[in-house]
Amino acid sequence: LPHHTQEVSHIAVDIGGTLAKVVFFTRNDKWERGRALGDSLIEKSDELPGGRLNFTSFETSKIDDCIAFMKKLLLKHHKRIDRNGHQRDPQHAEMVVMATGGGAYKFYDRMRAELGVEIYQEEEMRCLIVGLDFFINEIPEEVFTYSADDFPTMQFTDSSHAVYPYMLVNIGSGVSMIKVDGPNQFTRIGGSSLGGGTLWGLLSLLTDSRSFDDMLSMAESGDNTAVDMLVGDIYGRDYTSIGLKSTWIASSFGKVFKADPAPTAERPSEERRKKFKQEDIARSLLYAVSNNIGQIAYLQAQRYGLNTIYFGGSFIRGHAQTMNTLSFAIGFWSKGDMKAYFLRHEGYLGAVGAFLRRQP
Ligand code: ADP
């Protein structure tokens, strides 16, 4: 990022259906260090020559906070130049915001009015791919495989160059599957509406969890077999002739009705729900959504002859069960021929792509 290390010339925002992701560069000098650039909000930051790239996100429903944060970043930049008595930096006047995601359109007027700088809208799929290529090619220890059976479970791959063609499965509120044939050559080949928003929405109805991370930690301690119907529940053993193991899920949530039949006036739904542990429900739904995406991803990859599948999007959130389920699904259906790859900055592909789209 040589030209980005000179100055904080721009920030990028990817405003999706659920989360608004912000990426910005800060220089490594005394002024930047230790000063409250909303540091407590910064989720991740990575050292680069001359400074660091910072990552943070807001719920899109709190877009006001996000815009206020960007405004603060822009103001700090202005102040810095004044206090140091620098001549007006030629880039100063060019401070811009690179914006992508649906919110780049939906909130354009507000951002333009409140931030007072130029907002450049960038196409979302292109940004995802630009961001992904950057992470694959430029950032060491970014791409990894995950399996609960491996030790260590997380293994970084040496992907010093992107091998085309490959597929990106981006799991945000919904799911997009994109075939990438080369730099700047891509096609959206499919998707699914059963994505991160589905898990988030349904678990907010079915459990008392207050945040997405709450839901994930519930899932961690849950036992899905209390609500899922397994092959063994139906057959009493493995179904060997067609290769089904007794422990596999035959029907997600298939046990619920059997365990406690339909609601009645005396036993309304809320009462029935108490019979099942929220943790078990969370785990079952996490498995259901992840398995379903894994299977569609495999089928799409097979349809187009793609062997490499990268999974991105904030749904993954570095969560062990999610990654293990997706990895297992890909390995299982491809009989070990294909691998699922994950990224440390999985939620920020689009935002980083938009950041990089700024021409010097
Ligand atoms: P979008 O661009 O559609 O907003 P993201 O890639 O940002 O998509 O992913 C949104 C999904 O990420 C949510 O639907 C949810 O499953 C998950 N998620 C991760 N962290 C959070 C969070 N803090 N709040 C809400 N959802 C989150």
Image (cartoon, rainbow, N blue to C red):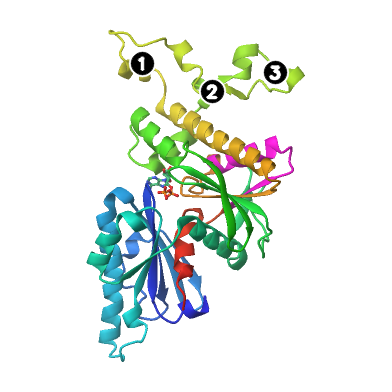
**Could you say where residue 246 lies in the image, as x and y percent from the top left?**
66, 20
Lateral position of residue 350 relative to residue 272, left or right = right
Q: Is residue 335 magenta?
A: yes
Q: CA distance from mark 3 to mark 1?
A: 31 Å
Q: CA distance from mark 2 to mark 3?
A: 16 Å
**Could you say where residue 325 lies in the image, as x and y percent from the top left?**
58, 38
The residue shown at (46%, 37%) is 193
- The residue wearing badge 1 is 272
Lateral position of residue 135 relative to residue 33, left or right = right
Element under disc 1: helix
Magenta range: 322-342
| Mark 3 surroundings within 10 Å by alpha-carbon count, few (fewer than 14), some (14 through 19), many (20 or more) | some
Q: Amino acid at mark 1?
A: Arg
The residue shown at (71%, 17%) is 239
Q: Nearer the viewer, residue 248 or 131?
A: 131
Element under disc 2: helix
- The residue wearing badge 3 is 238
Q: Amino acid at mark 3?
A: Asp
Q: Is mark 1 within 8 Å of ligand 1?
A: no
Numbered circle sitting on residue 225: 2
| Mark 2 surroundings within 10 Å by alpha-carbon count, few (fewer than 14), some (14 through 19), many (20 or more) | many
Q: CA distance from mark 1 to mark 2?
A: 17 Å
**Could you say where residue 259 lies in the image, as x and y percent from the top left?**
46, 12
